[in-house]
Image (cartoon, rainbow, N blue to C red):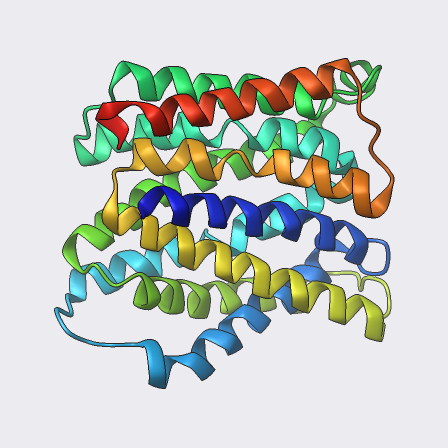
Amino acid sequence: MALTLALLSSLCFGVALITGRVGLRMLDARSGAAISVPTATLVFVIASPFALTVDGFDIRAALLFAAVGLFFPAVVTLLTFRSNELLGPTVTSAVSGTAPLVALLAAGLLLGERVPAHAAVSAAGVVVGVALLSWKRGAARRVFLGWSLLWPIAGAFVRGLAQAGAKAGLLLWGNPFAASLIGYVVSSATVVGADRFRRSRGRQLTRHGVAWFAGTGVLNGAAVLLMYAALTMAPVWTVAPIVASYPLITAVFGAVLLREEQFSWPVAAGATITVVAVVYLVGSPAGA
């Protein structure tokens, strides 16, 4: 069940990158984040009377969820949108794919998880596969020497740490909906504050831009909830590599729906390596 939830989370994250890409044609990154994160928060608040339970409530867990919410999804959303705006989804996806390595390291150091060899190999395979999926001729020469690369690097680092932090809270209070709700409420305050206090205003809001980012927020919110639900059932080393395979979804949907990405030998190789790495993790007796 945890593996299914992680795969569904990856699907939502992958499609959200496509809808966010469309939204960035109409609005800037901060404005988009100030729409997407509060939209997901509103959905969680509306659903809370039906989905939220306080059984087993632990104040330490709630504080951990709030602390994670200061950075994820708020800061990760801002960093991802900004990276997408500056570098495009190609480089953004490639660098973001390193998040499972950070997550596995953080889980080992902070949670004491013993990461088996097959999980480390799978995570490395996902990183290589995502890099190939996102490879474009000449992209490294144009982009990788610039400071703009710090945006997706920071996003991957925060995303990996957030997974370990959320797992720590879920060990105390295994309530993925509460973790998502608390985290998103705090994140909404972060992104709205960042948007309000910036010096210059972004592009004017448009109905279509708001709609695309609202949809992106719902998809990301669903992805986070599914990921947290998976983390209540399985260790970080099982969930993180599967969730990190979302650029494969982005590549497929981007090629089919947006017609911006062209399949090539590196893309085909990246897709194959990513799928094999995930299947290797899922098929291992230790990861079942």
- 242 versus 75 height, above or below: above
Relative horizontal placement of residue 213, taking residue 58 as reference (left or right)? right
In terms of image quadrants, where is residue 199? Answer: bottom right
Identify which residue is drawn at 64% across, 53% down: 16
Quadrant in which the C terminus is drawn:
top left
Relative horizontal placement of residue 240, taking residue 204 as reference (left or right)? left
In terms of image quadrants, where is residue 141? Answer: top right
Residue 235 position in % (x across, y down)? 25, 38
Relative horizontal placement of residue 274, taking residue 55 as reference (left or right)? right
Residue 99 position in % (x across, y down)? 47, 32
In terms of image quadrants, where is residue 118? Answer: top left
Identify which residue is drawn at 73% across, 43% down: 253
Q: Is residue 203 visible?
A: yes
Relative horizontal placement of residue 223, taking residue 262 as reference (left or right)? left
Q: Is residue 131 visible?
A: no
The total of numbered circles placed on residues is 0
- 49 versus 118 height, above or below: below
Identify which residue is drawn at 32% across, 33% down: 238
Residue 48 position in % (x across, y down)? 37, 80
In terms of depth relative to the viewer, which is nearer, 144 or 265? 265
Residue 158 position in % (x across, y down)? 46, 40
- 264 versus 65 height, above or below: above
